[in-house]
Amino acid sequence: MGIESVAILENSKMTPHTGKLYFVMIASVLLSCIASWIIARRYRGRMRQLMRVPQAGSLPAPMAETAPGTESASNAHPPAQATLAGNRRAGMRLSMLLAAVSCLIALSSACIWWTLVFPGEPMPAKRVAVVALLHLWPVVPALALVWRWSRSRLFGALLLWCAATYAVFLWRQIEPRPLEAMLAMASEIGLSLALVSAVFLGSATRAIAPWLLVPTALLLSAMLVGLDVLSWMAGHESPLLMLLIQPLEWLPGWSGVVVVFGIFLLLAGIIAWWPMRMSGRALGHAYSRKWLSDLLVLFTGVWAFALTDRTLTLSASIGVEAFAMYLSLLWIPVVMWLAGRFRQGRALPPTLLVLRVFQQDVQMQSLYDQVVERWRLSGNTVMIAGTDLADRTLDAGDIFQFLDGKLAQQFIISPADVTRRIDAFDMAADIDGRYRVNECYCHHTTWRDALQALVHRSDVVLMDLRGFQAHNAGCRHELATLARAARALRVVVLTDGRTDRAVAQADVASGRHERFTWIEVSRLDARMRRQVLAGLLA
């Protein structure tokens, strides 16, 4: 058996200390995933309530049409021309960047691992390369994030990577022992792979769970500390503990013990509440300052899982020195900062306005994953917020504002709010080079005002009219608004067999109907995705 496998299995021992840390790691992921589903459901419910019922005050007056030539200053200079080839190059650059960072993290962590496990011994390049390859698996979720792979494709790619790595492991063994090689791989990457898979299981968990991991870990750690304090007080027969237990002696059986445990857990949670809120707000602040992006938070989280699993396994034998493994994560901010320096001075990006038939959740979510996510490599995206894409567009600001009970403050309640809201849009590139999705939260009385303003801030429009019928009055108003818009626009309209195309074309006939490109979409496969992107990136 190879020396790498032997060292891995020998370091797979568990201590009480590492057991607690493993508990925090696993429970944080599971609780964050459960909380993500709950938050996403309550967020959608609150959005429906706010969209139907405006806040107190008179209904807003209709917003006046913008006259030709009076577009906002942001549109005074035409944006750069985005092309399909440029979009592909941007995607490849980002993929190669994340792959390069992953290789640097895997190689440097393998060197640190070898130094800690075999202190003073020479570092053979081939053996270190095998260890680095074993821990390079986070590059697969990284590519899945950029290209928005389906869950089946992601898990299939992870299985192929595991099979290829297993073959290399067997090849490097002095005496082939397939079972021991498999156990070594499972002990090193099995848990972190399972936890990452849990995060990637749903759209809500992928969008929300990474932002909740730090606050949840703080809460669980505080509770474990509370139980340790209780254990210490019990072992030393603390008078304070005796004073607490004495009034509970009337409770039957183990009830008194359960109450005492509950009191200590509750106190620990209360003490941890302020650090939890501060950590959440700090993450939201870092996101608003562009120190973080949704992609990098998930990418860093995946690597943190991988390194945590290795660190806890190693700490059981060598102690706190194992936490030096986390130094490898410093490659992420360093490389991203350097890459950002090369992107400075880019021309003004184009802005895409996304419109759709509401209550077509599944097909719109697929369109967002396949088209809008790729457009973000080339330019900004604006839209009117809806519950159909809440799982996709939720960011750190939305999550923590909702948890603080401030979602209503995001809504537009008057024409004056339209300008304020749109002027606050974040239209600069993220640290990873992609652009953000900005939304207008509207009541049923203000969405027309927001639409008018968004049209005059946009350069190209993607309108999903699959399933459109004559009774969809909102979409008909949008079509007429696009046809009458004074500024130059390119509008790509998606239709299918259920679309009442005659009504839609009649709604734009009195305006600039030549700006509309109609694409029949029977199925949004790779060929159709390229066709839609080519229409947007002409």
Image: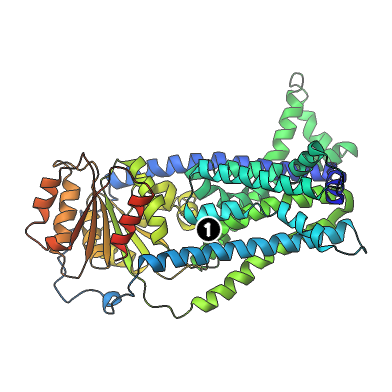
Report x, y in % for residue 380: 37, 65
Report x, y in % for residue 96: 56, 64
Give the crowd class for mark 1: few <14, some 14-19, many >=20 residues within 10 Å.
some
Residue at 17% x, 55% y is 479
Q: Secondary structure at mark 1?
A: helix
Q: Is residue 286 visible?
A: yes
User: Which residue is more in the foreground, 525 or 296?
Assistant: 525
Residue reaching furthest to the left: 510
Q: Quadrant of residue 118?
A: bottom right
The residue beneath circle 1 is 295
Q: How many marks?
A: 1
In the image, taking residue 488 as reference, residue 145 lies left or right, namely: right
Q: Reply above or below: 488 against 318.
A: below
User: Which residue is more in the foreground, 443 or 143?
Assistant: 143
Report x, y in % for residue 151: 51, 42
Residue at 70% x, 34% y is 262
- Dividing the image into 4 quarters, which one contains the C terminus? bottom left
Give the image's coloring scheme: rainbow
Q: Reply above or below: 505 against 93.
A: above
